[in-house]
Image: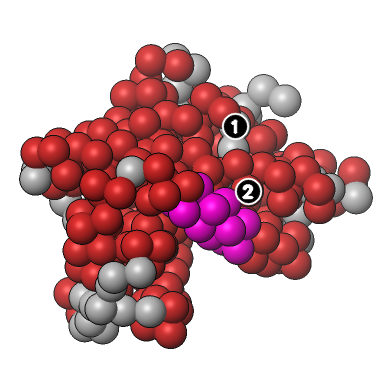
Amino acid sequence: MQPDERIMRGPGERRVAEAAERIIAEGRPRLHRTWASLVATSLLGGIDVGVGIMALLFVRHETGSELLSGLAFSIGLIALLLGHSELFTEGFLVPVTTVIAGAATWLDLARLWATVLVMNLVGGWIFTWIVIQAFPELHHTAATTGAHFVNGGYSLSTFCLSVLGGGVITLMTRMHHGTDSMTGKITASIIAAFVLAGFGLWHSVLDSLLAFAGLHTGHTPYGYADWLPWLAWSVLGNITGGLLLTTALRLIRSAPVLNEEKPSAEGSG
């Protein structure tokens, strides 16, 4: 389908419409995958992010720099992009847009979110266990880094850190769909990783893997009972940021395309 010419008026509107159509085209199969495909893709997402966590811990151990370690973490987001795996907070813009366009249901969205989050954590837990067993010299860095997040407290400040974390990853997803250039997509992943991990923003999966790495050392001032409420707080902030800071505004701008998609989606259903 070619975007309606009325949508094309104004600078940049054609690109907005084309990006919205790419998002919907990607979202349909993502929301209707088999359980086996969804579980495998999400498990791989946790492992891919785990590679970035390993790089982050190594650089932080060697340099003590949060900014450099944040840049090193970009390996994880690049792996997600090139490996076509799935990260929990990437499930905001594309799936929500697809549901709003009528190409999937809210139940499909809930299934996606729950499965991706759980399997990201499972894959990351396994991978960080391997990392900690392989590199004992990272124990202190892993324990202190994990404690920084889990013991960070529940305040307006930490909630805003979670909101920003969700917004940054969703913006990265939007930038990926705004270009056909792989160089541009990789650049967006590097920028997002630098801001997210380098600035110490809160991310439910990324920082859970840091918490797991610390827990695997057996020498942390926190336990799984402390991590669980932290996870809930972080997920709430990530969803708020991903939906309000990026997705909602993009939906408003893409509304003409979404309205055009609804009749065809309803007809095919």
* Residue 265 lies in the magenta-colored region: no
Q: Is residue 161 left or right of residue 189?
A: left
> Where is residue 106 drawn, in percent x and y?
71, 65
Picture quarter containing residue 234?
Answer: bottom left
Secondary element type, mark 1: loop
Picture quarter containing residue 189?
Answer: top left
Asked whether residue 67 is in view, the answer is no
> Where is residue 261 drawn, in percent x and y?
71, 42
Q: Is residue 100 left or right of residue 200?
A: right
Q: Residue drawn 34% across and 62% down?
A: 217
For marks 2 and 1 on the same chain, the one whose residue lies earlier in the sequence: 2
Q: In the rendered structure, which amino acid carries the disc numbered 2?
A: Ser
Secondary element type, mark 2: helix
Compute the Cα span from label 2 to label 1.
10 Å
Closest to the observer, 209 or 217: 217
The residue that disc 2 covers is: 42
Q: Is residue 22 left or right of residue 155?
A: right
Label 2 close to label 1 by CB (< 8 Å): no
Total labels drawn: 2
> Where is residue 114 drawn, in percent x and y?
64, 65
The residue that disc 1 covers is: 84
Closest to the observer, 237 or 140: 140
**Does 84 appear above or below 138?**
above
Name the magenta segment's main secondary structure.
helix
Q: Which residues are magenta?
A: 117-129
**Does 170 appear above or below 62?**
below
Q: In the rendered structure, which amino acid carries the disc numbered 1?
A: His
Q: Quadrant of the N terminus?
A: top right
